[in-house]
Amino acid sequence: DMACGQVRLSDDFEESVDEWSIFNGHDDDWLVTEGDDPRLCYQGKGGDLLLANKSNGSDYVVSANANLDSGQAYGIFFRATINENQQVEGYSFTYDPGYKGGRLLIQKWVNGYEIHPPIASTYPPKNFDWRDVDRHVEIDVTGNQFTASIDGEQVLVGNDDTYSEGSAGLRLWNGAKACFDNFSVNSP
């Protein structure tokens, strides 16, 4: 129950992306949609990485509503930092229909690169629709254990002790198109 916890960050994208740092200079590739329920959408051709400015911490739950429209995949970062080489280090949960027949992954990042093999990976539930579906994604980051859930169902658990703190964020690559809403980071 997160009611007793502390909200570090909650963004429904009503305003702008001022609460985020965009690292690859592709500010124009991110669009906040118009209307009653705006979402943050990536419309670029390459890829990008955003970190939520006020989300730094050790143990927290990252959650977001996400919808992959087209392209390969998206990732949600946790305990991520940018090192002296301006490269990301930390972890990501990756929603990837293009990886080995479609996998959900927890990955470690060192100096801007994903380390292989992933910390953990699994196939999604049977009859899983990857695209054009609103998914609620949650990653519980507690100590050295990371537990990912989709739509309230636990899908993956990974363990690693390399990074003890950092920020939450988003990642897209290879021109994937995706939209996000209700991104939040809550401390226990």
Image (cartoon, rainbow, N blue to C red):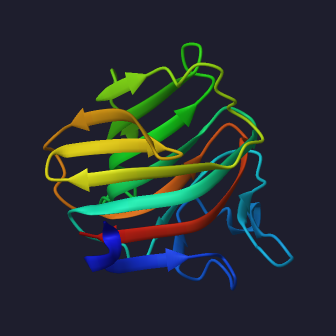
Say if 6 sits above or below 66 in the image.
below
Find residue 30 and report its horizontal and vertical position in percent. 72, 64
Q: Is residue 161 left or right of residue 55?
A: left
Does 177 sit left or right of 125 as displayed? right
Please say whether residue 87 is visible from this viewpoint.
no
Taking the image as shown, residue 44 lies to the left or right of residue 4, namely right
Residue 17 visible in the shown view = yes
Count of numbered labels shown in the rendering: 0
Q: Quadrant of the N terminus?
A: bottom left
* Location of residue 41 in the rendering, given as x and y in whole percent from the top left corner: 73, 60
Quick one: which residue is furthest to the right in this view? 35
Q: Name the spot of residue 83 as percent of width and height, x first.
A: 30, 58
Q: On the rendered structure, is 35 left or right of 60?
A: right
**Front one among 7 and 71:** 7
Image coordinates of residue 145 in percent, x first then y, are: 20, 43
Q: Quadrant of the C terminus?
A: bottom left
Question: In the image, is residue 38 above or below residue 79?
Answer: below
The foreground one among 122 and 88 is 122
Q: Is residue 95 above or below residue 138?
A: above
- In the picture, residue 118 is in which quadrant? top left
* Residue found 66% across the figure and 76% down from its top: 13
Residue 113 sits in which quadrant? top left
Residue drawn where x is 74% and y is 34% of the image: 71
| Residue under the image location 27 percent in, 44 percent down | 146
Q: Residue at x 42, y 31 (%)?
A: 105
Q: Is residue 26 above or below residue 118?
A: below
